[in-house]
Amino acid sequence: MNLSIELLKHNTMMNDRLIEVCRRLTDEQLESTVEGTYGTIGATLVHVADAQRSYAARFFGGERPQHLAETPFPGFAALTAAFDDGNRLLVQAAAEADTDGYVIIDDDDPDTTWRMHRSLLLLQAINHGTEHRSQIATILTQLGITAPEMDGWTFFFDANHMEKLQD
C-alpha cells in the first residue's frame, strides 16, 4: 500500500463529502463565515479547489491554471470540475512522489525564489485541505448544520480498509 496515495484518496473522499453537504446550502449560508476562518464557505471551497490544482501543476512542472473567482461564488458545476481535476492530479502526483525532482516556489514571496523536493509539496496539499475543510465544518456547526465525518476512521471504513475479524 502506498501511504501517499491513500492520504490523497482520503483528501479526495473528504472533499467530496463536504461538497455533498454544501450543495444543500442556501446562497445565504454559502456566504456565512466565522472569525478565524479563511472566509465564507463558498470562498473557502473555491480556495481549496484552486490550491489543489496549483499544487498539482507545480508538482508536474506545468502552468498553474486560472483561478476560479471566489466572489461571486462560481456555482457547484465549476467548483466540482475544479475539485475533480485537482483531486485526480494530486492522486497521480502521489503515485510519483518517490521520484526525483524539485519544484520552484517563486510567486508567494516576490523577493525570494525557493527550491524544494517536489514530493514535499504533497504535505502542504494534504495539510491545506484538512485545515480548510475543518474551518468549513466549524462554520456549518455554527449554522446548526451537521458537518460530515471526515476523519481517518471514516476513510478506513468507507474505502474498505477495515477487515472485520470477529463480532
Image: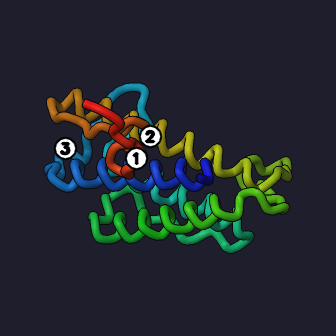
Instruction: Determine the secondary structure under disc 3.
Output: helix
How far apart in space, not on screen, are marks 2 and 1 (Cα)? 7 Å
Sequence order check, earlier mark of 2 and 3: 3
How far apart in space, not on screen, are marks 2 and 3 (Cα)? 17 Å
Q: Nearer the viewer, residue 52 or 63?
A: 52
Residue that mark 2 sits on: 132
For the point 85% across and 52% down, the residue is: 115
Q: Are marks 3 and 1 in contact (CB under 8 Å)?
A: no
Q: Quadrant of residue 33?
A: top left
27 relative to 128 in the view: left or right: left
x and y percent of residue 125 in the render?
A: 58, 49
Residue that mark 1 sits on: 44
Sequence order check, earlier mark of 3 and 1: 3
Residue 29, disc? 3
- For residue 121, above or below residue 65: above
Q: Are marks 2 and 1 in contact (CB under 8 Å)?
A: yes
**Residue 90 visible within the image:** yes
For the point 84% across and 48% down, the residue is: 111
For the point 54% across and 43% down, the residue is: 128
